[in-house]
Image: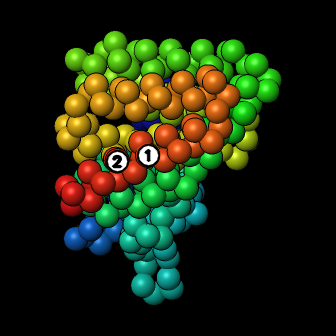
């Protein structure tokens, strides 16, 4: 196996096996043995074992004496791991999982919006405000290009997390990005773009005005509407 540029053999094998697991390749088939993995991928026992150890640490695999290695259910995976989140985007997920992701958004993003409004209002952080505004403008400007508009929609929410000034919220960005990527695929067709744009614009205006309470309420409303669509589509 020749690894992609910048990846070690172990990382390359980790990517290959991790994506296969998350995509469901082993949902109805046993996970291969170390010897089988090494033979198919041309990797040494050391590389193979290290990749399996890393997947086990991420909760995707478990190994038991005399029972071998098996794939764990989604509920056991480390869903805060950036690699696992990246792999998940490519997997057809049930509406239940997508809904659970968005309940996580509901728990964090409204408060992040409140903190961003306070941070920008008190510190006068125009750079953070400009980044939020630019992502909003690009989302609206590119409304005809669904993929590009979604990308800037995700950036808008991520920039608010960054603007909150809370380092824990900043580290939640991969999780929120994944939740948004999955949710928007289900919800974007159910609402007029102008309605969604107005909701995002109102959140921005509250943050710009330093209105923390208003920003929190508006962000909660925005996410609640998305959750309602997901429930309806389920």
The CA distance from mark 1 to mark 2 is: 6 Å
Q: Position of residue 10 (x, y in %)?
A: 53, 46
Which of the 4 quarters of the picture holds residue 72?
Answer: bottom left
Which of the 4 quarters of the picture holds residue 101?
Answer: bottom left
Secondary structure at badge 1 equals helix
Q: Position of residue 230 (x, y in %)?
A: 28, 54
Label 1 close to label 2 by CB (< 8 Å): yes
- The C terminus - image quarter: bottom left
Above or below for 75 versus 40:
below
Residue bearing mark 2: 225
Q: In the image, which disc is placed on residue 36?
A: none
Residue bearing mark 1: 221
Q: Give the residue drawn at x 38%, y 20%.
A: 139
Q: Position of residue 175 (x, y in %)?
A: 51, 47
Secondary structure at badge 2 equals helix
* Mark 2 surroundings within 10 Å by alpha-carbon count, few (fewer than 14), some (14 through 19), many (20 or more): some
Above or below for 128 versus 170:
above
Q: Give the residue drawn at x 49%, y 40%.
A: 218
Q: Give the residue drawn at x 22%, y 17%.
A: 144
Which of the 4 quarters of the picture holds residue 114?
Answer: top right
Between residues 218 and 148, which one lies in front from this camera angle? 218
- The N terminus - image quarter: top left
**Apparent side of residue 187 relative to residue 34 in the rendered image (left or right):** left
**Apparent side of residue 114 relative to residue 59 in the rendered image (left or right):** right
């Amino acid at each position: 196996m020749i690894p992609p540029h910048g990846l070690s053999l172990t990382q390359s094998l980790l990517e290959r096996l991790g994506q296969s697991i998350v995509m469901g390749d082993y949902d109805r088939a046993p996970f291969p043995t170390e010897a089988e993995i090494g033979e198919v991928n041309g990797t040494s026992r050391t590389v193979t074992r290290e990749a399996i150890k890393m997947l086990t640490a991420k909760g995707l695999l478990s190994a038991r004496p005399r029972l071998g290695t098996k794939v764990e259910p989604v509920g056991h995976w480390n869903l805060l791991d950036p690699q696992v989140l990246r792999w998940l985007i490519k997997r057809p997920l049930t509406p239940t999982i997508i809904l659970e992701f968005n309940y996580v958004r509901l728990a964090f993003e409204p408060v992040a919006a409140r903190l961003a409004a306070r941070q920008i209002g008190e510190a006068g952080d125009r750079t953070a405000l400009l980044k939020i505004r630019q992502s909003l403008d690009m989302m609206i400007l590119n409304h005809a290009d669904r993929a590009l508009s979604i990308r800037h929609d995700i950036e808008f929410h991520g920039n608010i997390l960054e603007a909150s000034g809370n380092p824990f919220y900043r580290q939640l960005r991969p999780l929120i990005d994944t939740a948004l990527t999955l949710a928007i695929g289900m919800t974007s067709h159910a609402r007029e773009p102008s309605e969604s744009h107005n909701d995002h614009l109102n959140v921005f205006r509250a943050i710009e005005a330093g209105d923390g309470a208003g920003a929190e309420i508006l962000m909660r409303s925005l996410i609640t509407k998305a959750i309602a669509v997901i429930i309806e589509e389920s």
